[in-house]
Image: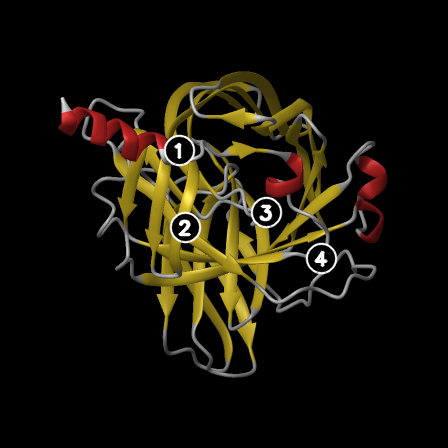
Amino acid sequence: MLAVALSLLAIYSFAQPTLKQSTNSPVPGEGFFGHIVDSTGLGDAQQAGAGVTWNFPVLTENSRDTNYYYSCETTPFCDSFTGANIVSLIDSNFEYGVSESNRLSFMGWASSNGVNRFYGRQVLLAYPFTYGDSYKDTLSIVDSYPGVYYDSIFVIDSFFADGYGTLILPSGTFTNVLRIHRVSLQLDSFRYDGADSGSIYGRMDDYSWFDTAGFHNPLLSVGYDTSGSTTPYIYNAEYYTQAPPLALGLLAPGVNDISLSVYPNPANGAINVTFLRSDNEPVSVSLVDMLGRVIKTTTLDQISEGASTVTLDVASVCPGMYIVKFQTGQDIFTRPVVVAR
């Protein structure tokens, strides 16, 4: 009995953390580094319960991205997103959202390539939210190009606050952390050149750990693809640290041109990415889906000056709308592309 009592005392010594707008929604001027890691050292990531210790001190960074937040009025596409008050800039894509006292939601995205508004909003966090709470959200996303393709995605997101405790990362130890498990069910229906290409069912189980001490971003995110009958696999994992504050100002809608072209578009078996370089700096070329998941990536350490071409094999990639992401040093460029059958 004494052992049981001591165990209960250890659990209840944690003050159950509660997510709130003031402590967890991003604010303009903030930025975060995303340290992208592989699955090594994440074996207990799905552990749930009260008073858990998630011990991930030896995660190895493979690459890094940066995410900054802006006020809507400082961005070039604000007029297309009525009510937006927080904007995330990732690569050259502006993601428009609404931060409210009861939720953080996502309205759509825009770039120099066009604007995509959701039918409704995708809830990212509900407030207040604490251990044992749950929330369900539905959303429709449509992306189309007249006479070429029509992509409709229906999403059901279910959120569960299924654990709290201590999170140990390479960046430090965090106590009173709340873990959110999001189950995302997606039905993607695609039509190309007037012909239906069928529907694709997907399921993603995403886990995010949140601090309540004013870190306005997840501390760690781990995503599992659980769509098929085979063993689920981690498609994305990254932990986050604070980036230097940003001096807010009006942003330009475009990015520098490097004569980047993507063809054929729509593509079937392969995508050719051609670009012009005046130096021999390493480059990476990735295929990213509309949920931000990296599907294919190629890194070239040696590049000759002048024109170069990288080929991405998409023969096994599901039909749909994707983004080709080209990165060299701190410069990132994107182009939309359709994979069709």
Question: Mark 4 near mark 2, Cβ–Cβ under 8 Å?
Answer: no
Query: In this rendering, which labeled residue sits more in front, label 4 or label 1?
Result: 4
Residue 172 image label = none
Q: Which of marks 2 and 1 is nearer the N terminus?
A: 2
Real-space CA distance between mark 3 and mark 1, rounded to the nearest whole angstrom: 18 Å
Residue 83 image position (x, y, % from top left): 81, 32
**Secondary structure type for disc 2:** strand
Q: What element carries label 4?
A: loop
Q: Is residue 318 above or below residue 186?
A: below
| Horizontal arrangement in the rendering, residue 293 relative to residue 99 (left or right) | left
- Sequence-first disc among 4 and 3: 4
- Quarter of the image containing the N terminus? top left
Q: Nearer the viewer, mark 4 or mark 2?
A: 2
Mark closer to the observer (4, 3): 3
Res. 216 mark = 3
- Report the quarter where the C terminus lies: top left
- Mark 4 and 1 residues: CB-CB less than 8 Å, in contact? no
Q: Which of marks 2 and 1 is in front?
A: 2
What's the amino acid at mark 1?
Answer: Asp
Q: Is mark 1 on a helix, strand or loop?
A: strand
**Circle 2 residue:** 174
Q: Which residue corresponds to mark 1?
A: 206
Q: Which residue is the site of mark 4? A: 29
Amino acid type for the residue under numbered disc 2: Phe
Q: How many labels does the image show?
A: 4
Tell us which disc is closer to us: 3 or 1: 3
* Image marks 3 and 1: residues in contact by CB distance under 8 Å: no
For marks 3 and 2 on the same chain, the one whose residue lies earlier in the sequence: 2
Q: Determine crowd level at label 1: few under 14, some 14-19, many 20+ residues with C-alpha closer than 10 A.
A: many
Q: Distance between the residues labelled 3 and 2?
A: 14 Å
